Amino acid sequence: MQEVKLFPTTTGQGWLEMSSHKDHAFNPPEEMRDHYDYLIIGAGYGGYGAVSRLAELHPDAKIAVIEAIKIGNNDSGKNAGFIIDVPHDFGDTGGSTFDDNKMYYKLNTAIIGRMRDTIKSTGVNVDWQDSGKYVCCCHPRSYKMINTEVKDLEKMGVDYKIYEGEELHRRLGTRYYSKALYTAGSTLVNPADVLRGLFTVLPDNVEVFEECPARRIDEGSKLSVTMQNGKVVTADYVIVTGGPFIEQFGIVKNVFCPVLSYGAFTRKLNKEELKDFQGVKPWGCTAGHPAGTTVRFTTDQRIYVRNGFSFNSELTTSHQRIRKAIPKLRKAFENRFPNLRHLNFEFLYGGMINMTLNFRPLMVQKSSNLFASACGEGAGVAKTCMMGHYIAEWISGIESEELNFLRRIAKPCRLPPDPFRTVGARIRLAWEEYNAKQEI
């Protein structure tokens, strides 16, 4: 297969710097074996879903998972930290039915429960809060999104609440929003902390290697994976869970439309600055428009904002582009928290959203022993983990209604090649941000 030309890179600082597991030492590279029964490329939530299920199904197998950079500095640790049961936009543009959406909800709930049970049973200390989530609107023209979601929630039998005015202010500590839809089933996390924590408690038959990029995969009776340092590892089965980087191995082509978004954290608020947050519990909200600003009041009492979109076919961003995102992040922060405008941002980052044209995930068998999976939309932590979980069951010969559903639904559209893809993506992103207006 083809040589990898683009590798994951570190793009700013964020959730990893606040993780209690940031200095955990995984297996040193020199301990990497020459052969594994199962090798997973990509130690994000998809890689975790795959390796945790394989270890459970095959306790005597030799299993390894490798990550090109530090675990938690990848895109699984560069998101807003929502693990969502009910997505903020039901379905996709590929023709999902009501039954499809019900299955997504069932699977999201199950995978969140599986992670929660692992955290409880192992006692690993991670930043995980079953806080639910808000969809918040500042302008009446955005209420349409709330009204649409309410209809879907009622049809599915999912509980929700609507908050407005003073009650909403008491819950959030900001008067910027006029109306919000709240659902209780989502979880708020430090995504890098939870990811690293979960990788520390895998069974003994799993070896975890970070900062070990894979350069190519060669097919045969046993797959050969050449590492960037020249070492060659063979495996009976290989699963690639690296989002758009799956294309770098030649497994699929012109499927992903990688969108960069930008996040910023204040320092921890002091006692005086917390006066507006008396009685306010940690919360997170997405905006009443998909291109709007996502906001968190974190468990360690910081304000987090994320907004701004860009497209880069090089699958990364630059320090200059991250700095360029600051004015829009500052405006969103100061509009919502005018009493805190004196605060600078302590951490800034750019993170990639693994979009596909029709928001469908990817789940593919390239050959008899080479598989790949990825999410295809912005509410992807639970879905990415789910795809890895069920691709492990697929390899293991376990048939189920859930696996059949995912194999049917996981059919992303092909994108036009560059330069048409880049031009089209940038026009679409600019249009979405223009329509978002005050929600940014």
Image (cartoon, grey):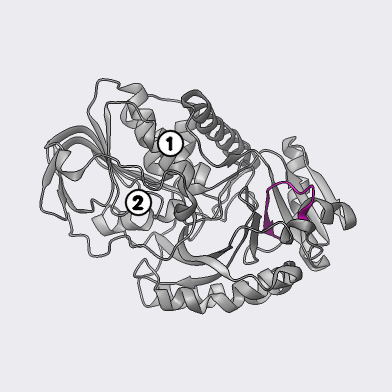
Q: Residue at x 38, y 45 (%)?
A: 373
Part of the protein shown in magenta: 277-287
| 234 in the magenta segment | no
Instruction: Identify residue for label 1.
Output: 198
Q: Of residues 106 and 215, which is closer to you in this image? A: 215
Q: Position of residue 187 (x, y in %)?
A: 61, 41
Q: Is residue 326 above or below residue 408?
A: below
Q: Amino acid at mark 1?
A: Leu
Residue type, mark 2 in image: Gly
Depth check: give the residue in front, 257 or 275.
275
Residue 246: % across, % down: 31, 54
Q: Please state if 149 lies on the left or on the right of 422 as rendered.
A: right
Tag 1 near tag 2, CB within 8 Å: no
User: What residue sits 55% from the left and 75% below the top?
Assistant: 326
Q: Determine if residue 327 is in view.
A: yes
Q: Which mark identifies residue 242?
A: 2
Against 327, residue 109 (above or below) is: above
Q: Quadrant of the N terminus?
A: bottom left
- Judged from this view, the residue extending furthest toward the right is 166
Q: Nearer the viewer, mark 1 or mark 2?
A: 1
